[in-house]
Amino acid sequence: MFPPLPNPPTQTTAPKFGPADLMRRSASTVTPPAQRQTEVAKLIDISKCIGCKACQVACNEWNELTPPIGDNFGVYQNPSDLLPDQWTLMRFTEWDNPQTGNLEWLIRKDGCMHCEDPGCLKACPAPGAIVQYTNGIVDFISENCIGCGYCVKGCPFNIPRISKTTHKAKKCTLCSDRVAVGQGPACAKACPTQAIVFGTKDDMKKWASGRVDDLKSRGFANAGLYDPAGVGGTHVMYVLPHADQPQLYANLPADPKIDPLVGVWKGKGKVAGLGAMALAVLAGVLHYLKNGPEVATEEDERKAKSLVDGAV
Amino acid sequence: MLSPQIHDSYPVAVDRYSGLTRLNHWINAFFFVALVLSGLAFYSPYTYFLSGLFGGGANARMLHPWFGVIVTISFLFLFFRFVGGNGWKPRDTAWMKNPGAVLSGDEEALPEAGKYNAGQKIVFWSMTMLIIIMIATGLVIWDQYFAAYTSIEVKRAAVLIHSVAATAAIIVLIIHIYAAIWVWGSIGAMTSGRVTGGWAWRHHRKWLRDLVAGRVDGDMPKA
Ligand code: HEM
Ligand code: SF4
Protein backbone atom coordinates (compact mmCIF):
# COMPACT_ATOMS: atom_id res chain seq x y z
CA MET A 1 0.00 0.00 0.00
CA PHE A 2 1.14 3.51 -0.76
CA PRO A 3 1.69 5.45 2.47
CA PRO A 4 -1.34 7.73 2.80
CA LEU A 5 -0.89 11.45 3.12
CA PRO A 6 -0.90 12.70 6.72
CA ASN A 7 -3.93 14.47 8.05
CA PRO A 8 -3.70 18.24 8.23
CA PRO A 9 -2.17 19.82 11.31
CA THR A 10 -4.48 21.84 13.51
CA GLN A 11 -2.26 24.93 13.48
CA THR A 12 -2.18 27.21 10.46
CA THR A 13 0.79 26.45 8.23
CA ALA A 14 2.59 28.85 5.93
CA PRO A 15 2.13 27.90 2.25
CA LYS A 16 5.07 25.93 0.87
CA PHE A 17 4.92 27.66 -2.48
CA GLY A 18 3.43 30.83 -3.87
CA PRO A 19 3.97 33.69 -6.28
CA ALA A 20 7.75 33.55 -5.73
CA ASP A 21 7.86 30.04 -7.18
CA LEU A 22 6.60 30.68 -10.69
CA MET A 23 8.44 29.22 -13.62
CA ARG A 24 5.96 30.42 -16.20
CA ARG A 25 3.36 33.16 -16.22
CA SER A 26 1.03 33.71 -19.17
CA ALA A 27 1.76 36.70 -21.45
CA SER A 28 4.66 37.77 -19.25
CA THR A 29 8.24 36.86 -18.60
CA VAL A 30 9.30 35.62 -15.19
CA THR A 31 12.72 34.76 -13.90
CA PRO A 32 12.25 31.37 -12.32
CA PRO A 33 13.81 30.96 -8.88
CA ALA A 34 17.28 29.41 -8.99
CA GLN A 35 16.06 26.38 -7.09
CA ARG A 36 13.16 24.46 -8.55
CA GLN A 37 10.83 22.84 -6.01
CA THR A 38 10.56 19.09 -6.06
CA GLU A 39 8.14 18.19 -8.81
CA VAL A 40 4.89 16.71 -7.61
CA ALA A 41 2.56 14.39 -9.48
CA LYS A 42 -0.72 12.62 -9.20
CA LEU A 43 -0.76 9.04 -10.38
CA ILE A 44 -4.06 7.57 -11.56
CA ASP A 45 -3.96 3.81 -11.75
CA ILE A 46 -6.74 2.83 -14.09
CA SER A 47 -6.45 -0.84 -13.18
CA LYS A 48 -7.44 -0.05 -9.62
CA CYS A 49 -10.32 2.29 -10.29
CA ILE A 50 -13.75 0.90 -9.48
CA GLY A 51 -15.65 3.86 -10.90
CA CYS A 52 -17.20 4.91 -7.61
CA LYS A 53 -16.68 8.62 -8.39
CA ALA A 54 -15.69 9.41 -4.82
CA CYS A 55 -12.93 11.55 -6.33
CA GLN A 56 -15.41 13.43 -8.47
CA VAL A 57 -17.53 14.19 -5.44
CA ALA A 58 -14.54 15.10 -3.29
CA CYS A 59 -13.36 17.51 -5.99
CA ASN A 60 -16.73 19.24 -6.14
CA GLU A 61 -16.89 19.30 -2.37
CA TRP A 62 -13.45 20.77 -1.78
CA ASN A 63 -13.70 23.29 -4.59
CA GLU A 64 -17.30 24.16 -3.81
CA LEU A 65 -18.54 23.24 -7.26
CA THR A 66 -22.19 22.58 -7.90
CA PRO A 67 -22.65 21.53 -11.51
CA PRO A 68 -26.20 21.73 -12.82
CA ILE A 69 -28.28 18.58 -12.78
CA GLY A 70 -27.65 16.97 -16.14
CA ASP A 71 -29.32 14.39 -18.34
CA ASN A 72 -28.87 10.66 -18.25
CA PHE A 73 -27.51 9.81 -21.67
CA GLY A 74 -27.53 6.08 -21.18
CA VAL A 75 -24.15 5.42 -19.62
CA TYR A 76 -22.67 5.58 -16.18
CA GLN A 77 -20.76 8.78 -16.93
CA ASN A 78 -22.24 11.81 -15.27
CA PRO A 79 -22.21 14.64 -16.25
CA SER A 80 -21.52 13.91 -19.88
CA ASP A 81 -18.52 16.24 -20.14
CA LEU A 82 -16.20 18.42 -18.11
CA LEU A 83 -17.84 21.71 -17.15
CA PRO A 84 -16.73 25.03 -15.68
CA ASP A 85 -17.90 23.54 -12.40
CA GLN A 86 -16.89 19.93 -13.02
CA TRP A 87 -13.12 19.80 -13.07
CA THR A 88 -12.72 16.07 -13.05
CA LEU A 89 -14.90 13.46 -14.72
CA MET A 90 -14.88 9.68 -14.76
CA ARG A 91 -15.16 8.67 -18.41
CA PHE A 92 -16.56 5.20 -18.99
CA THR A 93 -15.77 3.11 -22.05
CA GLU A 94 -16.93 -0.42 -22.80
CA TRP A 95 -14.38 -2.25 -24.87
CA ASP A 96 -14.48 -5.73 -26.38
CA ASN A 97 -10.92 -6.94 -26.13
CA PRO A 98 -10.47 -8.85 -29.40
CA GLN A 99 -7.54 -10.85 -28.00
CA THR A 100 -9.23 -12.20 -24.90
CA GLY A 101 -12.86 -11.88 -25.87
CA ASN A 102 -13.43 -10.09 -22.58
CA LEU A 103 -15.62 -7.07 -22.19
CA GLU A 104 -13.49 -4.52 -20.38
CA TRP A 105 -14.98 -1.55 -18.57
CA LEU A 106 -12.38 1.14 -18.95
CA ILE A 107 -12.73 4.02 -16.54
CA ARG A 108 -10.52 7.05 -16.89
CA LYS A 109 -10.50 10.00 -14.56
CA ASP A 110 -10.29 12.97 -16.94
CA GLY A 111 -9.03 16.39 -15.95
CA CYS A 112 -6.07 18.71 -16.30
CA MET A 113 -2.80 16.87 -16.86
CA HIS A 114 -0.63 19.70 -15.52
CA CYS A 115 1.67 19.55 -18.52
CA GLU A 116 5.32 20.45 -18.13
CA ASP A 117 4.86 22.44 -21.36
CA PRO A 118 1.30 23.75 -20.95
CA GLY A 119 -0.47 24.73 -24.17
CA CYS A 120 -3.10 26.67 -22.24
CA LEU A 121 -0.48 28.95 -20.74
CA LYS A 122 1.22 29.41 -24.07
CA ALA A 123 -2.03 30.49 -25.71
CA CYS A 124 -3.24 32.78 -22.91
CA PRO A 125 -3.12 36.52 -23.81
CA ALA A 126 -3.83 37.85 -20.31
CA PRO A 127 -0.80 38.48 -18.11
CA GLY A 128 -0.83 36.19 -15.10
CA ALA A 129 -4.12 34.45 -15.82
CA ILE A 130 -2.29 31.10 -16.03
CA VAL A 131 0.78 30.32 -13.96
CA GLN A 132 3.03 27.34 -13.56
CA TYR A 133 4.75 26.73 -10.24
CA THR A 134 8.19 25.18 -10.12
CA ASN A 135 6.65 22.05 -8.61
CA GLY A 136 4.81 21.55 -11.89
CA ILE A 137 1.31 22.67 -10.93
CA VAL A 138 -0.46 24.69 -13.64
CA ASP A 139 -3.00 27.03 -12.10
CA PHE A 140 -5.60 29.45 -13.46
CA ILE A 141 -5.70 32.78 -11.60
CA SER A 142 -9.28 33.84 -12.18
CA GLU A 143 -8.89 37.48 -11.25
CA ASN A 144 -6.57 37.92 -14.25
CA CYS A 145 -8.66 35.82 -16.62
CA ILE A 146 -10.54 37.70 -19.34
CA GLY A 147 -12.59 34.76 -20.58
CA CYS A 148 -11.35 34.78 -24.18
CA GLY A 149 -11.17 31.00 -24.51
CA TYR A 150 -7.64 30.93 -25.94
CA CYS A 151 -6.56 28.30 -23.34
CA VAL A 152 -9.21 25.98 -24.77
CA LYS A 153 -7.49 26.28 -28.14
CA GLY A 154 -4.03 25.80 -26.64
CA CYS A 155 -4.77 22.68 -24.59
CA PRO A 156 -4.01 19.37 -26.32
CA PHE A 157 -6.34 17.52 -23.91
CA ASN A 158 -9.51 19.64 -24.28
CA ILE A 159 -9.65 20.46 -20.57
CA PRO A 160 -10.40 24.14 -19.81
CA ARG A 161 -14.02 25.25 -19.77
CA ILE A 162 -15.24 28.85 -19.79
CA SER A 163 -18.11 29.73 -17.50
CA LYS A 164 -21.02 31.34 -19.31
CA THR A 165 -21.93 33.24 -16.17
CA THR A 166 -18.61 34.38 -14.69
CA HIS A 167 -16.67 34.36 -18.02
CA LYS A 168 -13.68 32.73 -16.33
CA ALA A 169 -11.73 29.68 -17.47
CA LYS A 170 -11.83 26.80 -15.02
CA LYS A 171 -10.06 23.49 -14.58
CA CYS A 172 -8.43 21.21 -12.00
CA THR A 173 -5.93 23.08 -9.83
CA LEU A 174 -4.25 19.88 -8.60
CA CYS A 175 -5.58 21.27 -5.33
CA SER A 176 -2.74 23.77 -5.28
CA ASP A 177 -4.24 25.23 -2.12
CA ARG A 178 -4.08 21.87 -0.34
CA VAL A 179 -0.69 20.92 -1.74
CA ALA A 180 0.70 24.26 -0.55
CA VAL A 181 0.04 23.22 3.03
CA GLY A 182 1.36 19.69 2.69
CA GLN A 183 -1.87 17.98 1.78
CA GLY A 184 -2.66 15.91 -1.27
CA PRO A 185 -5.44 16.62 -3.75
CA ALA A 186 -8.96 16.02 -2.49
CA CYS A 187 -9.54 13.31 -5.08
CA ALA A 188 -6.50 11.35 -3.91
CA LYS A 189 -7.63 11.71 -0.33
CA ALA A 190 -11.07 10.34 -1.13
CA CYS A 191 -10.09 7.41 -3.33
CA PRO A 192 -10.94 4.18 -1.47
CA THR A 193 -8.72 1.89 -3.58
CA GLN A 194 -5.60 4.01 -3.93
CA ALA A 195 -6.24 4.26 -7.64
CA ILE A 196 -5.19 7.89 -7.10
CA VAL A 197 -1.97 8.54 -5.25
CA PHE A 198 -0.02 11.74 -4.90
CA GLY A 199 3.60 12.53 -4.13
CA THR A 200 6.80 13.66 -5.77
CA LYS A 201 7.00 12.95 -9.47
CA ASP A 202 9.96 10.62 -8.92
CA ASP A 203 8.14 8.63 -6.28
CA MET A 204 5.09 8.40 -8.51
CA LYS A 205 7.17 7.03 -11.36
CA LYS A 206 8.73 4.45 -9.05
CA TRP A 207 5.36 3.48 -7.67
CA ALA A 208 4.00 3.26 -11.20
CA SER A 209 6.75 0.94 -12.33
CA GLY A 210 5.86 -1.48 -9.55
CA ARG A 211 2.24 -1.30 -10.66
CA VAL A 212 3.20 -1.86 -14.29
CA ASP A 213 5.26 -4.94 -13.35
CA ASP A 214 2.34 -6.28 -11.40
CA LEU A 215 -0.03 -5.76 -14.33
CA LYS A 216 2.41 -7.42 -16.72
CA SER A 217 2.64 -10.43 -14.44
CA ARG A 218 -1.14 -10.67 -14.65
CA GLY A 219 -1.21 -10.84 -18.40
CA PHE A 220 -1.41 -7.17 -19.37
CA ALA A 221 1.67 -7.35 -21.54
CA ASN A 222 1.29 -3.77 -22.76
CA ALA A 223 0.74 -2.15 -19.40
CA GLY A 224 2.66 1.07 -18.99
CA LEU A 225 2.93 4.58 -17.61
CA TYR A 226 1.36 7.51 -19.47
CA ASP A 227 3.65 10.52 -19.04
CA PRO A 228 3.59 11.89 -22.59
CA ALA A 229 6.88 13.36 -23.79
CA GLY A 230 5.18 15.54 -26.41
CA VAL A 231 4.11 17.98 -23.70
CA GLY A 232 7.33 17.55 -21.70
CA GLY A 233 5.71 15.00 -19.42
CA THR A 234 2.75 15.66 -17.15
CA HIS A 235 2.14 16.07 -13.46
CA VAL A 236 -0.92 13.88 -13.67
CA MET A 237 0.03 10.46 -14.96
CA TYR A 238 -1.87 7.29 -15.69
CA VAL A 239 -1.03 3.64 -15.25
CA LEU A 240 -2.72 2.13 -18.29
CA PRO A 241 -3.28 -1.62 -18.64
CA HIS A 242 -3.21 -1.07 -22.43
CA ALA A 243 -0.58 1.64 -22.68
CA ASP A 244 -0.02 0.77 -26.35
CA GLN A 245 -3.52 2.08 -27.12
CA PRO A 246 -4.22 5.13 -24.95
CA GLN A 247 -7.09 6.12 -27.30
CA LEU A 248 -9.11 3.20 -25.88
CA TYR A 249 -9.52 5.24 -22.73
CA ALA A 250 -12.11 7.74 -23.96
CA ASN A 251 -9.74 9.06 -26.64
CA LEU A 252 -6.76 9.80 -24.46
CA PRO A 253 -4.35 11.15 -27.10
CA ALA A 254 -1.53 8.74 -27.98
CA ASP A 255 1.00 11.49 -28.63
CA PRO A 256 -0.32 14.82 -27.32
CA LYS A 257 1.56 17.95 -28.36
CA ILE A 258 0.71 21.59 -28.51
CA ASP A 259 -0.85 21.90 -31.97
CA PRO A 260 1.57 23.37 -34.54
CA LEU A 261 -1.08 25.97 -35.46
CA VAL A 262 -0.94 27.22 -31.87
CA GLY A 263 2.83 27.43 -32.18
CA VAL A 264 2.53 29.55 -35.33
CA TRP A 265 -0.23 31.72 -33.86
CA LYS A 266 1.77 32.38 -30.71
CA GLY A 267 5.16 32.49 -32.41
CA LYS A 268 7.55 35.16 -33.56
CA GLY A 269 5.10 36.12 -36.30
CA LYS A 270 3.31 38.38 -33.83
CA VAL A 271 6.45 40.38 -33.14
CA ALA A 272 7.05 40.53 -36.89
CA GLY A 273 3.45 41.70 -37.32
CA LEU A 274 3.89 44.49 -34.80
CA GLY A 275 7.18 45.33 -36.48
CA ALA A 276 5.47 45.54 -39.87
CA MET A 277 2.81 47.86 -38.44
CA ALA A 278 5.48 50.08 -36.88
CA LEU A 279 7.42 50.02 -40.14
CA ALA A 280 4.33 51.13 -42.08
CA VAL A 281 3.95 54.10 -39.75
CA LEU A 282 7.66 54.88 -39.98
CA ALA A 283 7.58 54.66 -43.78
CA GLY A 284 4.75 57.18 -43.75
CA VAL A 285 6.65 59.59 -41.51
CA LEU A 286 9.81 59.33 -43.61
CA HIS A 287 7.89 59.70 -46.84
CA TYR A 288 6.22 62.85 -45.51
CA LEU A 289 9.51 64.29 -44.32
CA LYS A 290 11.09 63.64 -47.69
CA ASN A 291 8.24 64.66 -50.00
CA GLY A 292 6.15 67.01 -47.90
CA PRO A 293 2.41 67.21 -48.44
CA GLU A 294 0.94 66.68 -51.85
CA VAL A 295 -0.85 69.96 -52.53
CA ALA A 296 -2.95 71.12 -55.46
CA THR A 297 -1.34 74.24 -56.93
CA GLU A 298 -2.79 77.53 -58.20
CA GLU A 299 -2.17 76.21 -61.66
CA ASP A 300 -4.25 73.10 -60.94
CA GLU A 301 -7.07 75.37 -59.81
CA ARG A 302 -6.80 77.47 -62.97
CA LYS A 303 -6.81 74.39 -65.18
CA ALA A 304 -9.85 73.03 -63.38
CA LYS A 305 -11.56 76.37 -63.78
CA SER A 306 -10.89 76.53 -67.49
CA LEU A 307 -12.06 72.92 -67.92
CA VAL A 308 -15.31 73.82 -66.20
CA ASP A 309 -15.67 77.12 -68.05
CA GLY A 310 -15.01 75.38 -71.35
CA ALA A 311 -18.05 73.22 -70.75
CA VAL A 312 -20.49 76.02 -69.93
CA MET B 1 -24.29 69.99 -69.15
CA LEU B 2 -22.27 70.23 -65.93
CA SER B 3 -22.87 67.77 -63.12
CA PRO B 4 -24.73 69.47 -60.26
CA GLN B 5 -21.78 68.33 -58.14
CA ILE B 6 -19.66 71.09 -59.69
CA HIS B 7 -19.98 74.61 -58.37
CA ASP B 8 -18.55 77.10 -60.81
CA SER B 9 -16.80 79.46 -58.44
CA TYR B 10 -13.09 80.18 -58.12
CA PRO B 11 -11.59 77.93 -57.05
CA VAL B 12 -14.10 75.48 -58.42
CA ALA B 13 -15.80 73.44 -55.67
CA VAL B 14 -16.71 69.82 -56.29
CA ASP B 15 -19.01 67.69 -54.17
CA ARG B 16 -17.35 64.36 -53.56
CA TYR B 17 -19.34 62.67 -50.81
CA SER B 18 -22.93 63.03 -49.69
CA GLY B 19 -23.73 63.61 -46.03
CA LEU B 20 -24.90 60.03 -45.56
CA THR B 21 -21.74 58.63 -47.09
CA ARG B 22 -19.64 60.75 -44.76
CA LEU B 23 -21.66 59.70 -41.74
CA ASN B 24 -21.35 56.10 -42.81
CA HIS B 25 -17.60 56.47 -43.29
CA TRP B 26 -16.99 58.07 -39.90
CA ILE B 27 -19.10 55.51 -38.05
CA ASN B 28 -17.06 52.88 -39.80
CA ALA B 29 -13.78 54.63 -38.97
CA PHE B 30 -14.65 55.10 -35.31
CA PHE B 31 -15.65 51.50 -34.77
CA PHE B 32 -12.84 50.16 -36.89
CA VAL B 33 -10.29 51.95 -34.72
CA ALA B 34 -12.04 50.63 -31.60
CA LEU B 35 -11.99 47.20 -33.22
CA VAL B 36 -8.29 47.40 -33.98
CA LEU B 37 -7.34 48.65 -30.53
CA SER B 38 -9.47 46.07 -28.70
CA GLY B 39 -8.24 43.28 -30.97
CA LEU B 40 -4.60 44.27 -30.54
CA ALA B 41 -5.07 43.84 -26.79
CA PHE B 42 -5.17 40.07 -27.31
CA TYR B 43 -2.60 40.08 -30.08
CA SER B 44 0.56 40.16 -28.03
CA PRO B 45 1.72 40.82 -24.46
CA TYR B 46 3.27 44.05 -25.78
CA THR B 47 -0.14 45.39 -26.73
CA TYR B 48 -2.18 43.99 -23.84
CA PHE B 49 -2.13 47.42 -22.18
CA LEU B 50 -4.58 48.61 -24.85
CA SER B 51 -7.26 46.65 -23.01
CA GLY B 52 -7.13 49.49 -20.47
CA LEU B 53 -8.87 51.73 -23.03
CA PHE B 54 -11.93 49.55 -22.72
CA GLY B 55 -11.92 49.12 -18.97
CA GLY B 56 -9.80 45.97 -18.81
CA GLY B 57 -9.22 42.73 -20.68
CA ALA B 58 -12.60 41.21 -19.89
CA ASN B 59 -14.43 44.22 -21.31
CA ALA B 60 -12.20 44.33 -24.36
CA ARG B 61 -12.91 40.63 -24.90
CA MET B 62 -16.63 41.24 -24.59
CA LEU B 63 -16.70 44.37 -26.79
CA HIS B 64 -14.35 43.45 -29.62
CA PRO B 65 -16.69 41.03 -31.42
CA TRP B 66 -19.56 43.50 -31.16
CA PHE B 67 -17.38 46.21 -32.68
CA GLY B 68 -16.71 43.67 -35.42
CA VAL B 69 -20.41 43.19 -36.05
CA ILE B 70 -20.95 46.97 -36.21
CA VAL B 71 -18.02 47.41 -38.58
CA THR B 72 -19.20 44.60 -40.81
CA ILE B 73 -22.67 46.05 -41.12
CA SER B 74 -21.46 49.60 -41.62
CA PHE B 75 -18.85 48.44 -44.12
CA LEU B 76 -21.54 46.60 -46.03
CA PHE B 77 -23.34 49.90 -46.62
CA LEU B 78 -20.07 51.64 -47.41
CA PHE B 79 -19.27 48.87 -49.86
CA PHE B 80 -22.38 49.53 -51.90
CA ARG B 81 -21.76 53.28 -51.79
CA PHE B 82 -18.21 52.91 -53.07
CA VAL B 83 -18.18 49.82 -55.25
CA GLY B 84 -19.34 51.67 -58.37
CA GLY B 85 -16.12 53.67 -58.57
CA ASN B 86 -13.87 50.77 -57.72
CA GLY B 87 -14.01 48.54 -60.78
CA TRP B 88 -10.53 47.68 -61.97
CA LYS B 89 -9.61 49.28 -65.30
CA PRO B 90 -6.63 48.87 -67.62
CA ARG B 91 -5.50 52.38 -66.57
CA ASP B 92 -5.21 51.08 -63.02
CA THR B 93 -2.79 48.41 -64.09
CA ALA B 94 -0.72 51.05 -65.89
CA TRP B 95 -0.86 53.24 -62.76
CA MET B 96 0.47 50.38 -60.68
CA LYS B 97 3.40 49.90 -63.01
CA ASN B 98 4.90 53.25 -62.07
CA PRO B 99 5.33 53.22 -58.29
CA GLY B 100 8.08 55.83 -58.51
CA ALA B 101 5.67 58.42 -59.91
CA VAL B 102 2.99 57.42 -57.41
CA LEU B 103 5.27 57.85 -54.43
CA SER B 104 6.74 61.14 -55.60
CA GLY B 105 3.30 62.52 -56.46
CA ASP B 106 4.22 62.94 -60.11
CA GLU B 107 0.70 62.36 -61.36
CA GLU B 108 1.39 63.85 -64.80
CA ALA B 109 3.36 60.66 -65.44
CA LEU B 110 0.38 58.49 -64.49
CA PRO B 111 -2.86 57.68 -66.29
CA GLU B 112 -5.67 60.03 -65.27
CA ALA B 113 -7.57 58.52 -62.36
CA GLY B 114 -11.32 58.21 -62.07
CA LYS B 115 -13.09 58.75 -58.77
CA TYR B 116 -10.55 56.37 -57.27
CA ASN B 117 -6.99 55.66 -58.28
CA ALA B 118 -5.53 52.16 -58.31
CA GLY B 119 -4.11 52.50 -54.80
CA GLN B 120 -7.50 53.44 -53.40
CA LYS B 121 -9.09 50.54 -55.24
CA ILE B 122 -6.59 48.18 -53.69
CA VAL B 123 -7.40 49.55 -50.24
CA PHE B 124 -11.09 49.11 -50.97
CA TRP B 125 -10.89 45.55 -52.25
CA SER B 126 -8.36 44.34 -49.72
CA MET B 127 -10.43 45.73 -46.85
CA THR B 128 -13.48 44.05 -48.32
CA MET B 129 -11.74 40.68 -48.48
CA LEU B 130 -10.12 41.07 -45.08
CA ILE B 131 -13.36 42.03 -43.37
CA ILE B 132 -15.09 39.01 -44.91
CA ILE B 133 -12.26 36.80 -43.63
CA MET B 134 -12.36 38.42 -40.21
CA ILE B 135 -16.09 38.23 -39.68
CA ALA B 136 -16.06 34.59 -40.77
CA THR B 137 -13.16 33.59 -38.51
CA GLY B 138 -14.26 35.99 -35.77
CA LEU B 139 -17.63 34.27 -35.44
CA VAL B 140 -15.87 30.91 -35.19
CA ILE B 141 -13.80 32.10 -32.21
CA TRP B 142 -16.63 34.03 -30.56
CA ASP B 143 -16.98 31.48 -27.78
CA GLN B 144 -19.64 33.35 -25.86
CA TYR B 145 -22.25 32.46 -28.46
CA PHE B 146 -20.74 30.12 -31.00
CA ALA B 147 -18.38 27.81 -29.11
CA ALA B 148 -20.55 24.76 -29.74
CA TYR B 149 -20.65 25.04 -33.53
CA THR B 150 -17.06 24.24 -34.46
CA SER B 151 -14.35 21.91 -33.24
CA ILE B 152 -11.27 23.06 -31.39
CA GLU B 153 -9.14 22.19 -34.45
CA VAL B 154 -11.21 24.56 -36.59
CA LYS B 155 -10.99 27.27 -33.94
CA ARG B 156 -7.20 26.98 -33.86
CA ALA B 157 -7.03 27.58 -37.59
CA ALA B 158 -9.61 30.37 -37.34
CA VAL B 159 -7.80 32.32 -34.65
CA LEU B 160 -4.55 32.09 -36.60
CA ILE B 161 -6.18 33.27 -39.82
CA HIS B 162 -7.96 36.01 -37.88
CA SER B 163 -4.71 37.35 -36.49
CA VAL B 164 -2.91 37.20 -39.85
CA ALA B 165 -5.81 38.97 -41.57
CA ALA B 166 -5.90 41.54 -38.77
CA THR B 167 -2.21 42.26 -39.24
CA ALA B 168 -2.81 42.85 -42.94
CA ALA B 169 -5.92 44.96 -42.29
CA ILE B 170 -4.10 47.17 -39.82
CA ILE B 171 -1.31 47.79 -42.33
CA VAL B 172 -3.88 48.62 -45.02
CA LEU B 173 -5.53 50.98 -42.53
CA ILE B 174 -2.22 52.73 -41.85
CA ILE B 175 -1.63 53.17 -45.58
CA HIS B 176 -5.17 54.50 -46.01
CA ILE B 177 -4.79 57.03 -43.19
CA TYR B 178 -1.36 58.11 -44.38
CA ALA B 179 -2.59 58.69 -47.93
CA ALA B 180 -5.37 60.90 -46.57
CA ILE B 181 -2.87 62.94 -44.57
CA TRP B 182 -0.32 63.20 -47.35
CA VAL B 183 -2.69 64.31 -50.07
CA TRP B 184 -3.98 67.62 -48.77
CA GLY B 185 -7.63 68.22 -49.31
CA SER B 186 -8.55 64.55 -49.03
CA ILE B 187 -9.70 64.76 -45.44
CA GLY B 188 -11.93 67.68 -46.39
CA ALA B 189 -13.59 65.39 -48.90
CA MET B 190 -14.76 63.23 -46.00
CA THR B 191 -15.52 66.08 -43.59
CA SER B 192 -17.11 68.88 -45.59
CA GLY B 193 -17.85 66.57 -48.50
CA ARG B 194 -16.17 68.98 -50.92
CA VAL B 195 -12.87 69.24 -52.73
CA THR B 196 -11.49 72.01 -54.90
CA GLY B 197 -11.41 71.74 -58.64
CA GLY B 198 -7.61 71.86 -58.47
CA TRP B 199 -7.53 68.85 -56.18
CA ALA B 200 -9.76 66.95 -58.55
CA TRP B 201 -7.73 68.07 -61.56
CA ARG B 202 -4.51 66.98 -59.94
CA HIS B 203 -5.52 63.67 -58.43
CA HIS B 204 -8.71 62.47 -60.15
CA ARG B 205 -8.71 64.19 -63.51
CA LYS B 206 -10.79 61.60 -65.29
CA TRP B 207 -13.41 61.88 -62.56
CA LEU B 208 -13.44 65.68 -62.99
CA ARG B 209 -13.72 65.38 -66.75
CA ASP B 210 -16.64 62.96 -66.35
CA LEU B 211 -18.40 65.35 -63.97
CA VAL B 212 -17.84 68.24 -66.33
CA ALA B 213 -19.36 66.08 -69.05
CA GLY B 214 -22.46 65.68 -66.88
CA ARG B 215 -21.92 62.49 -64.90
CA VAL B 216 -23.41 62.31 -61.38
CA ASP B 217 -21.75 60.11 -58.75
CA GLY B 218 -23.82 57.19 -57.58
CA ASP B 219 -23.75 58.17 -53.92
CA MET B 220 -25.06 61.70 -54.49
CA PRO B 221 -28.63 62.54 -53.54
CA LYS B 222 -30.75 62.40 -56.66
CA ALA B 223 -31.66 66.04 -56.95
C1 HEM C 1 -15.61 41.54 -38.27
C2 HEM C 1 -15.94 40.88 -37.22
C3 HEM C 1 -14.99 40.43 -36.14
C4 HEM C 1 -15.33 39.57 -35.14
C5 HEM C 1 -16.69 38.95 -34.92
C6 HEM C 1 -14.14 39.37 -34.35
C7 HEM C 1 -14.06 38.53 -33.25
C8 HEM C 1 -12.91 38.26 -32.55
C9 HEM C 1 -12.84 37.40 -31.42
C10 HEM C 1 -14.00 36.61 -30.84
C11 HEM C 1 -11.55 37.41 -30.98
C12 HEM C 1 -11.01 36.66 -29.78
C13 HEM C 1 -10.96 37.60 -28.61
C14 HEM C 1 -12.33 37.92 -28.11
O1 HEM C 1 -13.04 37.01 -27.66
O2 HEM C 1 -12.72 39.10 -28.17
C15 HEM C 1 -10.80 38.26 -31.85
C16 HEM C 1 -9.44 38.51 -31.77
C17 HEM C 1 -8.77 39.47 -32.53
N1 HEM C 1 -9.33 40.30 -33.47
FE1 HEM C 1 -11.21 40.19 -34.14
N2 HEM C 1 -13.11 40.12 -34.85
C18 HEM C 1 -13.59 40.79 -35.96
C19 HEM C 1 -12.89 41.67 -36.77
C20 HEM C 1 -11.59 42.09 -36.53
C21 HEM C 1 -10.91 43.14 -37.28
C22 HEM C 1 -11.48 43.89 -38.48
C23 HEM C 1 -9.68 43.28 -36.71
C24 HEM C 1 -8.55 44.23 -37.05
C25 HEM C 1 -8.37 44.87 -38.13
C26 HEM C 1 -9.59 42.32 -35.65
C27 HEM C 1 -8.49 42.15 -34.87
C28 HEM C 1 -8.34 41.14 -33.95
C29 HEM C 1 -7.10 40.81 -33.33
C30 HEM C 1 -5.74 41.49 -33.59
C31 HEM C 1 -7.37 39.75 -32.45
C32 HEM C 1 -6.36 39.03 -31.59
C33 HEM C 1 -5.92 37.82 -32.38
C34 HEM C 1 -4.90 37.02 -31.65
O3 HEM C 1 -5.01 36.86 -30.42
O4 HEM C 1 -3.97 36.55 -32.28
N3 HEM C 1 -10.77 41.63 -35.55
N4 HEM C 1 -11.65 38.78 -32.81
S1 SF4 D 1 -3.93 19.59 -19.78
FE1 SF4 D 1 -4.60 21.47 -20.84
S2 SF4 D 1 -5.28 22.84 -19.21
FE2 SF4 D 1 -4.01 21.23 -18.24
S3 SF4 D 1 -1.90 22.07 -18.22
FE3 SF4 D 1 -2.08 20.86 -20.09
S4 SF4 D 1 -2.69 22.42 -21.60
FE4 SF4 D 1 -3.11 23.34 -19.60
Image (spheres, coloured by chain):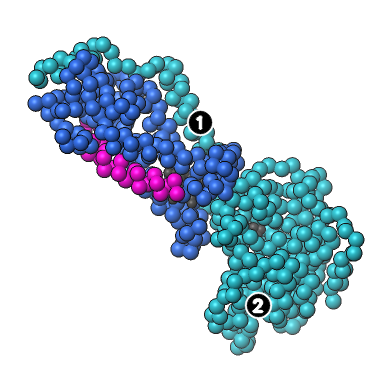
Chain colours: A cyan, B blue
Is residue A211 visible in the rendered image? The answer is no
Depth order, front residue of A41/A127: A127
Q: Position of residue B132 (x, y in %)?
A: 37, 48
Residue at label 2? A107
Is residue B82 visible in the rendered image? The answer is yes
| Main secondary structure type of the part rendered in magenta | helix
Badge 2 amino acid: Ile
**Residue drawn at x 35%, y 47% as measured from the top left:** B73
Q: Quadrant of ligand 2?
A: bottom right
Residue at label 1? A278
Q: Earlier in the sequence, mark 2 or mark 1?
A: 2
Classed neighbour count for the residue bearing mark 1: other residues with Cα under 10 Å, few (<14), some (14–19), many (≥20)? some
**Residue drawn at x 71%, y 43% as measured from the top left:** A30
Q: Which mark is residue B128?
A: none
Q: Position of residue A106 (x, y in %)?
A: 64, 79
Q: Secondary structure at mark 1?
A: helix
Q: Position of residue A206 (x, y in %)?
A: 81, 67
Q: Quadrant of the C terminus of chain A?
A: top left
Q: Is residue B67 magenta?
A: yes
- Left or right of A20 in this view: B78: left
